[in-house]
Image (cartoon, grey):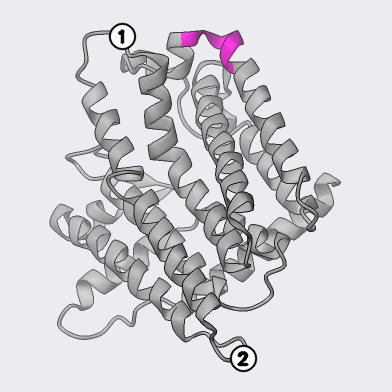
Amino acid sequence: MENSKFQELLQAKVYEIEEILKSYLPKEEGYQKTVLEAMNYSLLAGGKRLRPMLMQETYRMFGGEGSVVKPFMAAMEMIHTYSLVHDDLPAMDNDEYRRGRKTTWSVYGDAMGILAGDGLLNYAFETALKAFSVKDNQEQTLESMGAVAESLSVLAKKAGIYGMIGGQTVDIEAENQDRQLSTEEILFVHEHKTAALIQASMMVGAILAGADKESVAAIEKCAYNIGIAFQIQDDVLDVIGDSKELGKMVGSDAQNNKQTYVTINGLESSRKEVERLSNEAVTILNSFPGEHEFLEALILQLIHRRN
């Protein structure tokens, strides 16, 4: 796909997702108005909306045409946003700025930052549950309700202690380790902290579109490769990236004595692994008959990004 065409499509799809997200925002009213304002402030802070985009494109690739995916798209972005809100807190990364503007806790205070993150996580599931009432111009069947229930299960597991939260836990504990971490431990963090929500996004898209179990398992593997390659590339860019392109200082991992895939396996080996994982992901994608030209281009741009 030509880059100009890809960028045009990308902008249109981001706009579509922004409109979907806005349609599910909670109203800023009542005695709890402050936390609702903080939640919406966080959600509308911008971003690439990659996870709901991956969900929507996977849904379409497997033939999905209805609106049942929309509550899940919004829910996924809420979960991703809550994780960023909590990451920025003084007890975690202590960041006062994200994407060029004040972080949630630095505007509303750290206590309200915690509550805003909690609110987003809970409201994400309130939002996803609305998929049960989406009719798509036809009556809900037991099969379609089963797909929604299965999608909720995937979303909960990949976001929880056996997914993103589990990865974050190991990552925090690794900061205080004097010993060198193993590649297995680094990959555990990358799989759970980064790849898990990408897996959830693509798996939910496939499940809601009616994909069979073998296809969902293949998509889970494809998304694993995407997530791991994305994070290794992030480690690589911290070594060889351009500060102006990245929008942040390079070399911060080494300066902070942070152990990464690159520090353990070396730069050249890491770059080869990114290439292997991305090629395998595209091969899996090409095994499916649906339209996925844009999805493939999105994945390759995500993995081989320069910023």
Query: Is-magenta flag for residue 269?
Result: yes
266 to the left or right of 222: left
In the depicted structure, whether residue 84 falls above or below residue 130: above
Q: Are marks 2 and 1 in contact (CB under 8 Å)?
A: no
Magenta residues (range): 265-270
Q: Quadrant of residue 271?
A: top right
Q: Is tag 2's residue or tag 1's residue first in the polypeptide sequence?
A: 2
In the depicted structure, whether residue 148 falls above or below residue 198: below
Residue 102 seen: no
Residue 202 seen: yes
Quarter holding the C terminus is top right
Q: Amino acid at mark 1?
A: Gln
The number of numbered discs placed on residues in the rendered structure image is 2
Q: Quadrant of residue 25?
A: bottom left
Residue at figure coordinates x 30%, y 52% from the top left: 85
Q: Secondary structure at mark 2?
A: loop
| Foreground disc of the pair 2, 1 | 2
Query: Is-magenta flag for residue 188?
Result: no
The spot of residue 256 in percent (x, y) is: 31, 18
Residue 138: which numbered mark, if any? 2
Residue at figure coordinates x 46%, y 86% from the top left: 133
Residue 180: which numbered mark, if any? 1
